Image: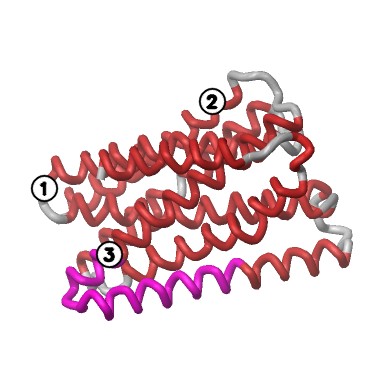
Amino acid sequence: MTELAIIGIVGSLVAGALTGLGGVVVMLGRAPDPRRQNLLMGFAAGVMIAAAFFSLIIPGIERAQATGSSREIAAVIVIGAVLLGALAMAQLGRGIDRIARARLATLPGWLADDAEHRRILLFILAVTLHNIPEGTAVGVSFMSGDASLGWATALGIGIQNIPEGMAVAAALSTLGWSRARCVLAALATGLIEPFGGAIGVAIVQTSTAALPWALGFSAGAMLFVVMADIIPGTSRRIEHGSATPALMAGLAIMMFLDVTLG
């Protein structure tokens, strides 16, 4: 069991590190102009919507059913977790706004500048948060005792992490971050997955009841950021072109990866 636990955490680390590859892909291109910025944020929104439903909400319901809940109870559990996640992000956003308005001397300049910076911060936090249950899924898969299932899960999540890393790097590039910082930030959002892998190992060793709540909570956080911040932000910049095609592209790509790679 100890060997499986270690492999599960390592597998989640490998999957998470692929967010850095996504950052590299984006940073190999030229700095985004306003139109490309809008398209990149739309792409990020599409990726997050698909990830919320196909990587978090649907697996959360399935996990709840696997623990003995009926379909109805499983849906109620995950819906409750989604609402809690959205509420948590709403409260976090209000807290960030209050701090920014106070203009505390210790507040970093990149956060205090304007609402766009705070919007990007919430987006990065949501992506990072959702990587925790993804790492958990990897850990749980390895703890099933089937190494092939564990590595298949790690590969599937790792490939999905590439467009997520692209979304993070693209968002930060719109704030004028250097290429190196954007890549490192994209990598950092994925490197939290080993923490999720450790949670998955612990859940299997104790109880699997918490996993549906973790999946739903992360989905709610992601959906709140998309609906409350990213989509309204791209709409306000409509003079630079609609972000809808990019949103649909991100949604389609992520949906394909989630469905085909499981």
Q: Amino acid at mark 2?
A: Val
Local secondary structure at mark 3: helix
Looking at the image, which is closer to me, 156 or 4? 156
Is tag 2's residue or tag 1's residue first in the polypeptide sequence?
2
Residue 158 seen from this side: yes
Q: Is residue 17 visible?
A: no
30 horizontally vs 165: left or right: right
Residue 24 is marked as: 2
Colouring scheme applied when the structure was drawn: secondary structure
For marks 3 and 1, the one nearer the N-term is: 1
Q: Nearer the viewer, residue 101 or 3?
A: 101
Give residue 77's position: percent from left, percent from top. 34, 77
Answer yes or no: do the residues labelled 3 and 2 have beta carbons within 8 Å? no
Q: Which residue is mark 3?
A: 202
**Nearer mark to the viewer, of 3 and 2:** 2
Disc 3 to disc 1, how far (Cα)?
17 Å
Picture quadrant where residue 242 is located? top right
| Helix, strand or loop under label 2 | helix
In-image side of 43 versus 198 (left or right) = right
Identified by mark 3, the residue type is Ala
Give how far across and how far down residue 176 sits, in percent: 76, 33
Dominant secondary structure, magenta: helix
Q: Which residue is mark 1?
A: 146
- In the displayed structure, 75 sits above or below 125; it is below
In space, the residues marked 3 and 2 are separated at their CA atoms by 33 Å
- Magenta residues span 61-89
Position of 155 with respect to 96 (left or right) is left
The residue at the point 74 percent across, 27 percent down is: 33
